[in-house]
Each structure stands twice: as structure tokens, then as C-alpha cells.
Amino acid sequence: MTTTTPRTEILGEPEPPQPAHPDTRRHPARILAATLCALLGSGLVGGAALATWAEHRAAARPLPADAAYRKAGSLWRAAPVDSLLPPVLTGPSAGPGGSDRTWTRIALAPDADCPAALAADWQALLAATGCTRVLRATYTDATRSSLITVGMVFTPAGAPAMAALRGHVPAPPAYGFTDAQRAAWASSVLTEAPVVVYTVSAFADGRAPGALHPAADLMKKEATGAAAQAGLGHEAQALADRVGHGLAFLAAPPATPTPEPTR
């Protein structure tokens, strides 16, 4: 068995040094500096948020009407082709007797110079406005019994010069079928963009209707003949309306509200 002699405390021996405890009281100058840094940091973050919000708000703000009109003249190269000439278009109540219609794009032409895409009478019409580019596509209805050419003629002209074209646009050329097969046509000079939208319809089986008529004439209740009964006037007018409305929306989209920044 072993024993251990307990350690005897020596009087007057100094206690070993203890680690210093941090002062829990902060110096006023340090508190002030920390507060200033926090305020400065929050101010920088808030300023960045306000700047970003201001940029988004400026981007969402609609352009003045004249600037938006001029900008719309470049949509032929700035907008996706599927937004200008959608692969599928629907026309609720757009057919004879209020029947529903659906059209599918079956041919798409490369954008073309005006002399290559337009007949001589169209080139003469656009001599006063100029002509930048022509887009064209061919659609067919759900039964594939009709063909409809859709065209967009972009110009560099201002609104007054374009307005002067209304009522003077001649029958348009076809694309995807011959001019002899044309049955009905429609056109629209847009107010939102320097563009003329036109359509022309035909029988898909290639037969010649014998005459070409404005779409409005074939849409009358008293209209007779195979083209009127087949709804070729309705086809031309409905596609002109829908493509024109789509282009107008791209030219002047509604402004979207910008949420207020968080502070």
C-alpha cells in the first residue's frame, strides 16, 4: 500500500495569474463607429435597390407614341418570327355562320426585298412611303380545303404617310399558290406601326375561282358562288385581323406595373 503526502499550502505564495476577462462594457467611440458603419451599409444597399427599381421602372415605362411607332418598323428583324406569324392561329366564330376556325402555318418565306416580293402596283403604291422588308407565310384551315397567304410590308414612313394609303391598297400577290387561284383578299394599314398587313385566300385543290373579290364582298349574306360558300372571304378577313392585332400588340404592349422597392 502506498500513501500520498498532501501538498501543504505555503503562506504568502502568490496565486497564479488568471486570464483576463473581456470587458463587457464597450467603449462609446466603438459603439458610435459600429452604428455609423451599419447605417452606411444599409444606405448603400437601399440606394442600390432604389437604383435597380428606377431602372426597371424606366424600362417598363411605355415609349412616346411617335417613338414606339418608329421602333415598330424594325419588328421584322427584332421580333421572333413565331410571334409575328404564329404557327397556329385560332378564330372563334370567325367562319360563316359564326363557326370556329383554326389555321396552321404550312409555309414560311424568308424575309424578302420589296421588289422581289411585291407586284408592280404595290411598288408604285409604296413609292411615297418607301419599303423596308416583306414577310410572308401560307396557312391552311383545319380541313385543309383552303390556303391563305399572309403578308406584312414594313416601311420607314411616318403615321401621316401611312394613313394616306388607306383605301388605296390594291389586291395583294399570292405566296404558296398562283395569282390565278386567288379568291378573296383583305388588307389593313396599322395605326400602331408603319406596316401594311394583307391576306389572300384560295382553294387548296388548285381550282381557279374565276374572279378575285374583296373579302368583305364574299362575307355578305347575299353573296353566292363556291368561294363565298366555302368561307374564303371569312378566311382572308379573319387572318388579316388576327395577324394585325398581334403585330399591334408587339408594337405597343400594355405597360406592366413595377412593384415598389423594399426599404
Image: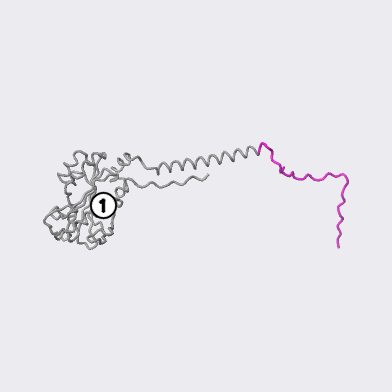
Name the residue that disc number 1 marks: 241
Residue 25 horizontal side relative to residue 77, left or right: right
Question: In terms of image quadrants, where is residue 130?
Answer: top left
Q: How is the image coloured?
A: one colour
Q: Give the percent coordinates (x, y) of residue 234.
A: 21, 57
Residue 152 horizontal side relative to residue 58, left or right: left
Q: Give the percent coordinates (x, y) of residue 115.
A: 18, 43
Question: In terms of image quadrants, where is residue 98?
Answer: bottom left
Q: Give the percent coordinates (x, y) of residue 223.
A: 16, 58
99 to 60, vertically: above or below: below
- Is 143 included in the stretch rendered in magenta? no
Q: Give the percent coordinates (x, y) of residue 175.
A: 19, 52
- Total labels: the figure holds 1
Which of the two residues, 178 or 109, is positioned nearer the viewer here? 178
Single out the residue that lies furthest toward the front: 222
Q: Which residues are magenta?
A: 1-30
Q: Please tell me whether the stretch drawn in magenta is mainly helix, strand or loop.
A: loop
| Amino acid of disc 1 | Asp
The residue located at (57%, 38%) in the rendering is: 40
